[in-house]
Amino acid sequence: MEKQRKDGEVEAVPVVIGGMVLDIQATSSIPPHPRTTCPGQIYYVQGGVARNIAECMTKLGAQPFMISALGFDMPDLMLLERWRLVLPVWKQLKCFLHPSGFNNSSTQYILLLY
């Protein structure tokens, strides 16, 4: 992809295509027992190989254009909000929501540690 600079020169823009995923890590405070609840902690971490690459490129000074497919649910809204808070200068994110709208969920990775 290319964009025109103010001085008239054309500049190449890196394009990153791939996934944005919300990784969920859950740890148990006590040993778990079948058919009981277990106190613990849950951590939400941004993941997805393409998202990780785009974030690293941004921290190195590049402004990549990222294309990703998302569901329309809480995890993806959390990912998008986190992007706005952490990298407010990074505006080149193109997300494609599934045509049927609210009925589609995102990809999630859940790691349970005990």
Image (cartoon, rainbow, N blue to C red):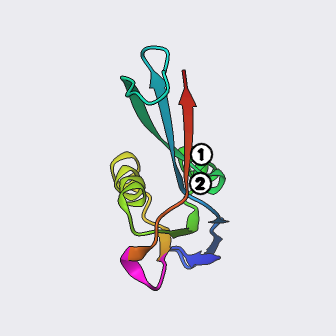
Residue 45, position in %: x, y? 48, 40
Q: Is residue 52 above or below residue 2?
A: above
Q: Is residue 89 above or below residue 100?
A: above
Residue under circle 1? 56
- Does the residue at mark 1 contact the one at mark 2 (Cβ under 8 Å)? yes
Q: Is residue 9 visible?
A: no
98 in the magenta segment: yes
Side of 98 relative to 17 (left or right) = left
Give the magenta range.
97-102
28 in the magenta segment: no
Rendered image: mark on residue 77? none
Pointer 2 local density, CA inside 10 Å: few below 14, some 14–19, many at least 20? many
Residue found 50% across the figure and 62% down from its top: 106
What amino acid is found at the position of numbered circle 2 in the picture? Ala
Pointer 1 local density, CA inside 10 Å: few below 14, some 14–19, many at least 20? few
Quadrant position of residue 69 = bottom right
Q: In the current view of this chain or complex, which residue is farthest to the top? A: 30
Number of numbered discs on residues: 2
Side of 58 relative to 91 (left or right) = right
What amino acid is found at the position of numbered circle 1 in the picture? Cys
Residue under circle 2? 54
Residue found 42% across the figure and 54% down from its top: 79
| Helix, strand or loop status at disc 1 | helix
- Real-space Cα separation, disc 1 to disc 2, in angstroms: 5 Å
Side of 17 relative to 34 (left or right) = right
